Amino acid sequence: MDEKINLKAIERYSEEFSEKLIGNWFASRDAITGQEILQFSEIKQINLFVIYELFRTWKQESVKNRSPYFDYDAPEVREAAQALMNALSNHIRVDRNNFSALLRKATYNTLLLIVDPYDFFADLIEKHTQLVPSEFADHLKYVRINKAPLQRLLDKLQERDVKSISGNEAFALLDSILEEVNFTPEDIDEYLATFSKVVPVSIDSFYEKKEEPKPRIEPEQSNHYQWQPVKSTVNDKLSQEPRPVIADQFMRISSIKESLTINQKFMFTKVLFHGDFELFSRAIEDLDRQDHLQGALRYLEKNYQEWDRESEEFHEFMELLEKRFGPQ
């Protein structure tokens, strides 16, 4: 079963897609202008990410090259800097080699935003030790796809007049927003059809191939859950063998839902629940209502036999169950 996003596959496709477009464009040109970048790809998000990277790089270089002998915050200097920025924006000119790197990055980020928005959100926020709403707003101006949760995050920060927030706090707030808006990623078929006009691609190309599921969840004394082709039920097996002791190493938790980090929610939703946040949330609520570990395992056995029992995500999920239903 296709479950886990293959970032290397996205990277490889981005390079192939970019080189195809670049080869066509630069066959008769030696550079590309700002206005031409905005119209370069039929997928507008790619063009916007290229422009964003140009201005982000310019701002970084401007700060890095500041001299300690001048007041760059003086109104006249700030006004002049803005005038320079406006002038530069009308005189963008990028050669093939430099544009190639920009386009590959923009294509990769666009594909990630389309097929794996949770990782895109995580990458975007993790870049900030401290997230500054004004800077975050500048970035969001260039995001057009699956933007709603990020825009809501910015709105909340601005409503609270927050000047700066840690990355972890931003994750926690985004977590509540995803539940609040019941976020469902945009349909990807139309986007992939547009990509395929340049280089054919299907959604399966971006997922790691998994083996066909084997029957049943089986806890073992080794503290690992693995596939076991047995005829007995999970409950029968538990009555015959000592219970897993992973939870003995941790303090028991009262709720799986309340203990989940935003990274875990993104990870479990993407890998175990096929990107369906609503399905993930419902499963967590059902598991939290169970009375004991055996009941939780029977629930998973009934509904999620296809899970890859060798994946890191599966074992991390099982550890949460142990913490929830393990001994005090």
Image: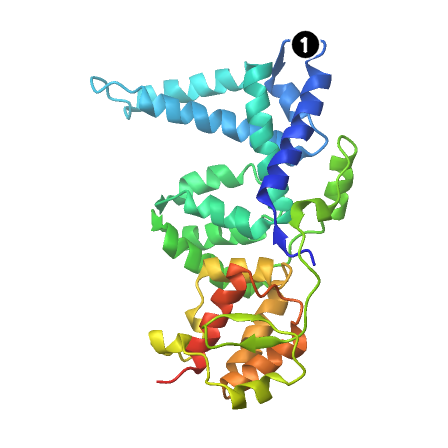
Q: Position of residue 190 (x, y in %)?
A: 76, 44
Residue 323 visible in the snapshot: yes
Residue sitting at 76 percent across and 47 percent down?
189
User: Which quarter of the figure has residue 49?
Assistant: top right
Q: Quadrant of the C terminus?
A: bottom left
Residue sitting at 43 percent across and 63 percent down?
261
- Residue 239 or 314: which is nearer the viewer? 239
Left or right of residue 87, residue 253 in this image = left
Q: Is residue 57 above or below residue 312?
A: above
- Residue 148 or 9: which is nearer the viewer? 9
Q: Position of residue 111 (x, y in %)?
A: 63, 41
Residue sitting at 58 percent across and 66 percent down?
309
User: Which quarter of the figure has residue 135?
Assistant: top left
- Residue at image mark 1: 29
Residue type at tag 1: Arg
How many residues crowd around disc 1 within 10 Å: few (fewer than 14), some, or many (20 or more)?
Answer: few
Q: Quadrant of the N terminus?
A: bottom right
- Residue 267 or 103: which is nearer the viewer? 267
Residue sitting at 63 percent across and 85 percent down?
233
